[in-house]
Amino acid sequence: MSSPASHFLDAAGEACGTVTPVIRQALAPLAPGELLEVLTNDPATRAGVPAWCRLTGHMLVDSREDDAQRTRFWIRKKDQPSQPA
Amino acid sequence: MAKHILVNCVHGREDAERATLPFIVGNVAATADQQCTVFLTAEAVRIATRGYADDVQAHGMKPLAEVLQSFLANGGVVWACGACTGPRGITEADLIPGARIVTAVNLVETLAGGAIPLNLT
């Protein structure tokens, strides 16, 4: 993914069980449609972040594995606010 | 559609890892637009009391107090089992904001209503 995101979250150090709350917090101030780039260094996020996007409706636009540990995700904030149905 | 996930927690500071994990998973659920209740039984009921979680931290995990507050701030609910708080002398006056003492009837009602039980211990 080469197009720049409007916001960047360095989530390195967050584990699989803590990264998605941090992503949600980072997305909160973004306008619908804005793109957030997220960097993680827990390989478990490669399964967790896509699952979180499926659950919440935020669009996982792209992902890239930088190396064995690090992964970048590009998440587009959905049109509706994230709230329980 | 959001699901209601009910996570059981049975340990207090005697097992910091097992005390914290339900709240980590609960926070993931709450921030994934799911409804989540952490149901405390046995020694875990003490987690719902003021100050108890302040010095509980498992190796490799965030402090329990931090995870607990994040869970509550993200809409999570904490229930403490009345059968377990009673013998320990814990009352509503001892609880942190966002926690309440419930009975087995509340638990059964919630499960009968379709909540998904999860036990991580």
Image (spheres, rainbow, N blue to C red):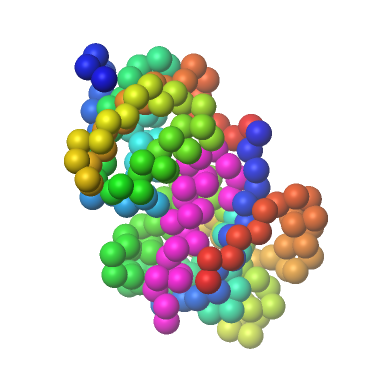
- Per the image, is A62 magenta? no
Q: Which residues are magenta?
A: B14-36
Kindly report the secondary structure that dominates the magenta region of the rendered protein.
helix
State the image quarter where residue B85 is shown: bottom right
Q: How many marks?
A: 0
Residue drawn at 47 percent across, 48 percent down: B28
Image location of residue A77, percent across then percent down: 41, 22
Q: Is residue B90 visible?
A: no
Q: Is residue A79 above or below residue B42?
A: above
Residue drawn at 53 percent across, 71 percent down: B121
Specify the farthest residue to the front.
A68
Specify the farthest residue to the bottom.
B87
Image location of residue B2, percent across then percent down: 63, 38
Q: Nearer the viewer, residue A33 or A42?
A: A42
- Per the image, is B25 magenta? yes
Residue drawn at 51 percent across, 27 percent down: A57
Q: Nearer the viewer, residue B56 or A65?
A: A65
Residue drawn at 65 percent across, 43 percent down: B3
Q: Is residue A22 visible?
A: yes
Image location of residue B86, percent across then percent down: 65, 80
Specify the farthest residue to the left.
A67
Q: Nearer the viewer, residue A51 or B38?
A: A51
Image location of residue B113, percent across then percent down: 78, 50
Horizontal arrangement in the rendering, residue B105 relative to residue A48 (left or right)? right
User: Where is the N terminus of chain B found, in terms of image quarters?
Assistant: top right
